[in-house]
Image: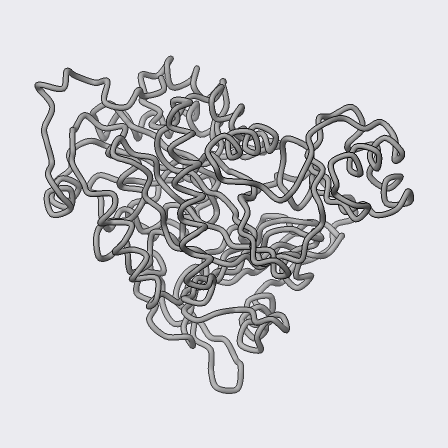
Amino acid sequence: MTATPGSASSAGSRRHLSGIAEIRTFFRTNQQPIYFIGPTAFNLLGIDRWVRNFQYIAYYDSWDGQHPRVFTPENRPYVEFESSEQINNYLLRDPEVREYLSRRGGTPMVAMVFFDEETEEICREQGYTLILPPDTLRRRLDSKIVTTQLGNEAGAPSVPNVLGHAGSYAALTALAREAGLGDDLVVQTPYGDSGKTTFFIKSERDWDDCAADIDGQQLKVMKRINNQAAAVEACITRHGTIVGPFMTDLTGYPELTPYKGGWCGNDVFPEALSEADRTIAISHVRRLGDRLAQEGYRGFFEVDVLMDTDTGAVYLGELNPRISGASSMTNVTAGAYADVPLFLFHLLEFMDVDYTVDVEEINDRWRALAAVDVWSQLIMKEPGDDVERILAAPRTGAWRLSDGGALTFEHVTNDWHEITTEDEAFFMRVYGPGDFKFHGADLGILVTKGCMQTAAGLTERCRHYIEGIRAQYKSEPLPQAPPVMPIAYVK
């Protein structure tokens, strides 16, 4: 079943929490079993530090059984998964997982990044509470077309664009010229990872290269601008929208991803946005959040904003109505430690509790604390085309970078919250010995302090981390490539 915010009991009988101190105490003494389910524990890793009875159910055990709150079933026969939703549904049906949840007692509340109607049906059958907005609502809002329309209604404009269909290059250019967009265009289809469903078209040859992917779909056709992009997560609560820290994306670096335009990490740092741009961007995100609330949406979402470097305009980018790959950064920043991690406000919307917070005060405080946060993460995919069996892989835990650039393992640790300097990092392995490396496979995530990119590209320190981690992988070619099991940390 999918939870309806505040529906478990009448308002008169629910506990009331007033302010951050009481909210902290509520979660530190929480008796309700809450689970994050996914291919790995990555997205909400560290929330167990804040929420008692918070556990992770993962298909891949990055800690080899050494994390006390990560459960992975021992019997995992080969299944050719095609999506993260399929992995999550498999876990929900797995007998070991069901026995584990039953043994721990209570009515499980479960959260995840990706889910579908089948997920909701499984939860209804098993008596689990899915603490996420309904799949039908999430899917509708996930459309780039719908995001643009709702943003316009809320006063949060997108890059100059026109919505429509085009069955030929001539039709596309006619549509764009009528809207005053020129001939250098960015075209998006409604759904999918922007790295794979965004097309740059300024000639008929460009059209021919992508026509099969966009023909017959409703399109968002945008003027191509010189832009600086930033990502931010926010949470829609009954008291208003709380906006997290802004971060820049690492995109398309061949050292990290084989996908041109593919997301491969984030930097959180004070200069991610100028003060003026931050003010406008926060306003756009809050306007969008309030408009989404009118659609019935509550809880976590991620949105991109685009700054036009030529005109100074700030635009709304695409929306991800869910927990995202940026959650790992959002929940470890100074604002999270001053109050509580942003995800805890999501939990409050789906738990049997009433609460009062001053959203204006929280947003002001988090905006001020953005001046002290410097974090980064690398999402490391396999760039090669060959399929190979992994013989050895880096361990999950703390690693240290020497002055000469050598990377060495220090000790096992549960998450990255204790990282304090730029020469230490937390690496979370995804695929280990016996698994396969293949084109685009998510090998692991590295989190550290400091920034990983400048205007000139990846920093030297970043390259040392990448080279050091990749050097830990040993693999052997296979005479015949088997089917593979993709995992997507799609934003």
Can residue 423 be seen here?
yes
Q: In which quarter of the image is residue 104?
A: top left
Q: Where is residue 350 in the image (x, y as percent from the top left)?
A: 27, 28
What residue lies at 57% left-to-right and 33% top-to-bottom? 148
Q: From the viewer's perspective, is 300 left or right of 26?
A: right
Q: Quadrant of residue 241?
A: top left
Q: In which quarter of the image is residue 158?
A: top right
Q: From the viewer's perspective, is 97 left or right of 167?
A: left
Q: Where is residue 233 in the image (x, y as percent from the top left)?
A: 41, 46
Residue 126 position (above or below residue 16): above
The one nearer the camera, 158 or 331, is 158
Q: Where is residue 43 in the image (x, y as percent from the top left)?
A: 42, 46
Q: Where is residue 247 in the image (x, y as percent from the top left)?
A: 46, 57
Q: From the viewer's perspective, is 160 left or right of 210?
A: left
The one nearer the camera, 443 or 282, is 282
What residue lies at 73% left-to-right and 56% top-to-bottom? 384
Residue 483 position (above or below residue 257): above
What residue lies at 66% left-to-right and 49% top-to-bottom? 440
Residue 486 position (above or below residue 117): below
Quarter of the picture containing the N terminus is: top left
Residue 411 position (above or below residue 200): below
